[in-house]
Amino acid sequence: MKITTKKTLGQNFIFDKNLLIKISNSFESKLNNSIIEIGPGLCTLTDFLYKKKYKQLILIEKDIRLISNLKKKFNESKVKVLNIDALSFNYTANCLNHSIIIGNLPFNVSVDLLYLWTKCKKWPPKHDKMILMFQREVAKRITALPNNKHYGKLSVVIQSRYKIRKIFDIPASAFTPKPKVDATMLEFTPFNDFRYIDINKIDKVTKDAFSQRRKKIKNNMANYLNEIENLSISPDLRPENLSVLDYCNIAKNI
């Protein structure tokens, strides 16, 4: 199937069979899992996901031009093809337990999607794992540890709810059309219980903390000084010096 890619949809397809097999083999699935693919596009990865074990395969595709081909190719009860924006889909209401979300995410909405899944009200979520692709620089921000220039609000918010593992890097040359940046595949496994804190509080605390990241926290986190002192955190530290657990504890006590 030939199709002109739409820049507005962030479409960059992968056709390398060995790479697609590597992506598909990066996770295990069982008969009780539901696999949700974001942006199946031309079915290049879907063809391999289709062969895995699962209870249900859900394909979420925004581009109406690709829907008829997807429905024709995967016309069976275990496969659902949905023509919807992944940002608008209600994952909590419409997905089965033990879901696995996978996708070569459009770079222009990848962070928005990650925040959507991270901020779901019901926790632990219905998904057991996520296998997602990001621009390499974004992946560095997601996985960054304290005292690193990439460490910031995104790092803390996502790491407060997920254990994250880097799977592998993917060069820009592997995509069609070729983007300007390389990509990285990450694995996200939700923490089940002990880190459950109001995610909106963590979001607010980190937004304040990293609004001026070079300032000491006694200045840009002045509203939380009582909590900071009670936790024996030095107010002379800078935002990047605090651990994810520090931010979780501050959020828990406000």
Image: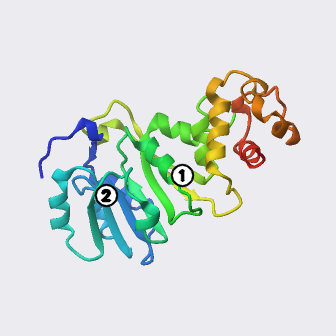
Q: Give the labeled residue for mark 1.
A: 118
Q: Which residue is depicted at the point 34% across and 36% down? A: 172
Q: Is residue 221 left or right of residue 33?
A: right
Q: Amino acid at mark 2?
A: Ile
Nearest the eye: 44 or 17: 44
User: What element does badge 1 sit on?
Assistant: helix
Quarter of the figure with the C terminus: top right
Q: In front: 225, or 47?
A: 225
In the picture, measured across the screen, residue 140 lies left or right of residue 112, that is: right
Q: Earlier in the sequence, mark 2 or mark 1?
A: 2
Residue type at mark 1 is Thr
Image location (x, y in percent) of residue 102: 40, 57
Disc 2: which residue: 60
Q: Are marks 2 and 1 in contact (CB under 8 Å)?
A: no
In the image, farthest residue toward the left: 2
Mark 2 neighbour density, 10 Å: few (under 14) some (14–19) many (20 or more): many
Tell me residue 241's x, y (percent).
Answer: 73, 32
Q: Position of residue 237 (x, y in %)?
A: 78, 28
Q: CA distance from mark 2 to mark 1?
A: 18 Å
